Image: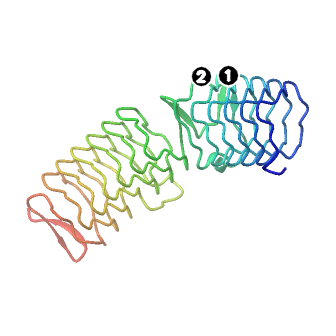
Amino acid sequence: MDASIDLNGGQLAGAALVGKDLSGADLSGADLSYAFLSEANLTGANLTGANLRNANIVECNLTGANLTRADLTSADLSESALTNAILTNAIIEDAVISCDEPEDSYDGIVSGNITGVPIDLHHSLKLVIGFLVGPEVDLQGVNIAGTSLSEVNLYNANFRGANLRGANLSGAWLGRTDFTGADLIAADLSGTTNGNGMLTVPGPVLVDCKLTQAKLNYAMLEMSDLRGATLVGADLSNSRLSMANLDGVDLSRSLMHGVTGSQINGTPKALPEGWFLHNGELMNQS
């Protein structure tokens, strides 16, 4: 459909739109309650403030769609692709947001201030204080300080510039997770992993992160990028840092008992007393 077609505020309650091409359409403020939209193409559609209560949105392509402030109460989005879709301030009470397809159906999804609890939510996603959290999601700049994301799969998620101060990420899967510039002061990243038992990938990107007094004990940080990070007073005991990039990292007063680290890249700004880097290996004089 041509993006210039304007259905803004349209009265389409109960409309039969099965399989229709609505890509790029302006459906902002439209009444699509009880509409039949299964297998429709809504790629890039503007559904801002749309009423989609009880709508059948099964097997739809909602890639890049804007669902800001949309009312999805009791809507069925089974098997629908929401890649890069925006659900900020959406209502998802009793909605079905799940599929049997690969988890990339939710890659890049943007959320915040979501209200309501879905009746069925894909196993890879978790609703945390109004945010949809999971692998590949876009949570850049969000404020979720002090929240619990313990044991959540956050593979390749975007937390650039986010406030995670005091958050609990213990046991979370952080393979390729991007925390560039994030505030992780006093956060708990203990036991975090960059593998799922079958696959090991580079660890999290922690470039320029604030990790003062953070807990990283027993964390798997192999191949992680920590350039410029501040870990003053952090607990890194028994963590694994092999092949990590520690260039410019401040590790002063950190706890490093039992740390393993070889093939280290870069030169740390500071190491705790008694520790030094020799031929890419972290070593303790004692």
Q: Amino acid at mark 1?
A: Asp
Q: Amino acid at mark 2?
A: Gly
Label 1 secondary element: loop
Q: Which mark is residue 116?
A: 2
Quarter where residue 75 is shown: top right
Residue at the spot 77% in from the left edge and 30% down from the top edge: 9
Is disc 1 in contact with disc 2, using a CB cutoff of under 8 Å?
A: yes
Around disc 1, counting alpha carbons within 10 Å, would you say few (fewer than 14), some (14 to 19), or many (20 or more)?
some
Classify 222 as above or below 31: below
Q: Which mark is residue 94?
A: 1
Classify 26 as above or below 273: above
Q: Nearer the viewer, residue 104 or 171?
A: 104
Quarter where residue 240 is shown: bottom left
Residue at the spot 29% in from the left edge and 69% down from the top edge: 262
Residue at the spot 12% in from the left edge and 57% down from the top edge: 272
Around disc 2, counting alpha carbons within 10 Å, would you say few (fewer than 14), some (14 to 19), or many (20 or more)?
some
Classify 24 as above or below 250: above
